Amino acid sequence: MSVDRTSTTRFPVTVDAALREAGWQPGRWDIKQAEYWADALRSHESSAGHRHAVFPAAVEAWAEFGGLRVTPLGAGRQIAPAQLAFDPLAGLHMARTLGDLGRALDTDVCPLGAEGESQAVLAIDAEGRVYSLDHSGDWFIGADIDQALATLVSGAMPVRLAMS
């Protein structure tokens, strides 16, 4: 399959190409799948009683990017670019961790997917900001999904969250 390497005005060329290679196209919208994930997350309760927050910014991100496995097509700018899997159920058992992050940030946080082979969980907050949580800490990836995709696919250095 030939992939058009010209950029939309929305994403940098390399990000656009990687998204299209993964099956994304402008106007992609699978709200039925997004609602399935929303229901699955809402109904999950940890053994300690922790539950996921679900909100419009998460549902919209799942509807547009859910199910995609994005593989960067080049070398990273500052770090290795991340392979992404947009499946919020990758964070199903992280309700407490995401709830703790949300309290620290004074917002709700919900799973978005995973980086690499589950080395990190991607999360989104109620304002649409994107984070990555891994063994080394919590990272701010972008002010919105577009910025986060540009950071992750291009291998730009994310900002480590410093919480007191």
Image: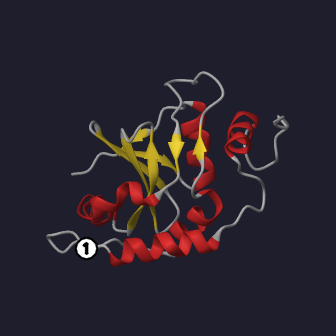
Residue kind at label 1, given as amino acid type: Glu
Colour pattern: secondary structure
On screen, 126 above or below 87? below
Q: Is residue 71 left or right of residue 94?
A: right
Q: What residue does disc 1 label? A: 45
Residue 54 image point, x, y percent: 43, 74
Neighbour tally class for label 1: few under 14, some 14-19, many 20 plus, Cα within 10 Å: some
Residue 44 image point, x, y percent: 31, 73
Q: Residue at point 85% right, 38% down?
A: 4
Q: Is residue 35 left or right of residue 97?
A: right
Residue 121 image point, x, y percent: 38, 48
Q: Quadrant of residue 13?
A: top right
Q: Nearer the viewer, residue 16 or 77?
A: 16
On screen, 39 above or below 28? below
Q: Tag 1, which secondary structure?
A: loop
Q: Residue at point 84% right, 34% down?
A: 2
Q: Residue at point 57% right, 55% down?
A: 67
Residue 37 image point, x, y percent: 48, 69
